Amino acid sequence: MRSERVICCWGMGITQHKRGGDAMQQIINLLLLRGNIGKLGAGACPIRGHSNVQGDRTMGIFEKAGEPFLASMSKVFGFEASRKKGHAVADTCEALLRGEVEAFISMGGNFFRAIPDTDVICPTVSRLKMTVLVNTKLNRSATVHGRKAFLLPCVARSELDMQNGVAQTITVEDSMSMVHGSTGMLEPASKDLISEVAIIAGIAKATLAPNPKVDWDSYVNDYARIRDKIEEVLPEQFYDFNQRILEPGGFRLPNDASERKWNTESGRANFLFPEGVYDEDDTPPGADHLQLMTIRSHDQFNTTVYSNDDRYRDIYGDRMVVMLNPQDIKRLGLKAGDYVEFQTALDPITPRSAAGFKVIPYDVPQGCCAAYYPETNGLLPLANRDRHGNTPAAKSIPVNLVRMNPESTQIALERRGLIAAAS
């Protein structure tokens, strides 16, 4: 607290709660109180897991893009951009449940493995007329598909992307608002692979009416032309775009708050306060249910699991585990090595469960437990999410634990190949 310059970092341990947005607002309030916004060596540092999450939003990949962006894009490309609100992930899942989706197109990712309520939502996908996945490698989302399904492999960012004999450069924006170029170096997995740019442009060219202001083929042939158009749409942020990405480390996008420009009615920084300070996610020790937090292991990047080992927590060879405080193990009448079934303690109309998790004593707070993602995604109701950002509350899922009987344990272990099936 005595430090003159403070940087507050946070990740999903803060955001993946029903009050995650409120918690972030209080972090910003603290930084404002200390004068740590707009000061060199101080400020807010949200941690993202992907290299270009922030860049997507800057480029308008947003279900509710702002009017200035839409108006500028309409002018540059000679069409009227839709002002209709689109679907974020949670909105998409709800639309699937309501039967309102006819086709699903995914650019990268592992959507149907990453979402909450997988056991409820994924069965609805078979009703879709078409699903399209554009990916650099196969993943489990390929097994969740509509009546017609297309898998379109593409050049990975790490691979050399040659167009007309010239290596192409794309750009990414990191969490510090730094934009830099990225040029693949590896030989593509196949000479028949095409780039994401070529796939998007090809779909657009085949679908949309001809537009004299849009030359899809020229964008595919030279990505610098795409950056020229980005500069036209967003001239204040991306002036001299193609020149500035050649600078070592790239360039930084402007951020009004970092310059202490407050875009508020008062012209001053505003403090935001939640409606009430009681956090209903808290579970006091001794409560009937536990709060499950879903976590990632050391050998894991998002839904990609490289091995069943987790040297962070000294757990090896198995991911189907539940980490419990020793006091809770005793209180629940369990012991280390028991196998349990999770039962979500929400929404009695739609029961959610997951079986075959081995009890491991671990240093977690009383009233809480931890298990790996995405194996436990089916326990998280879609409605259990933050009201500000629609982020699933994956760090606070109310659950009950039920000890499995020997017969159920045997079946669970056989299915996972940990023991031989009984003859």
Image (cartoon, helix red, strand yellow):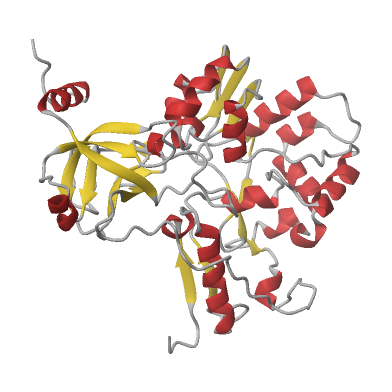
Q: Residue at x 24, y 47 (%)?
A: 310
The residue closer to the viewer here, 262 or 158, is 262
106 to 291, vertically: above or below: above
- Is residue 189 visible from the viewing direction of this image? no
267 in relation to 220, above or below: below
In the image, taking residue 207 as reference, residue 191 lies left or right, namely left
x then y, percent, for residue 268: 73, 79
Tell which of 131 and 279 is nearer to you: 279
Left or right of 252 on screen, residue 373: left
Residue 313: x percent and y percent? 22, 53
Quadrant of the snapshot with the C terminus: top left
Q: Position of residue 371 (x, y in %)?
A: 29, 45
User: Going 77% across and 20% down the picture, which residue do you hit?
Assistant: 206
Q: Which residue is located at x 26 percent, y 60 percent?
A: 285
Q: Is residue 347 left or right of residue 388?
A: left
Q: Quadrant of the N terminus?
A: bottom left
Q: Tell me if residue 198 can be seen.
A: yes
Q: Residue at x 91, y 38 (%)?
A: 78
Instruction: Note whether 219 is above or below 6 in the view shown.
Output: above
Residue 167 image-quadrant placement? top right
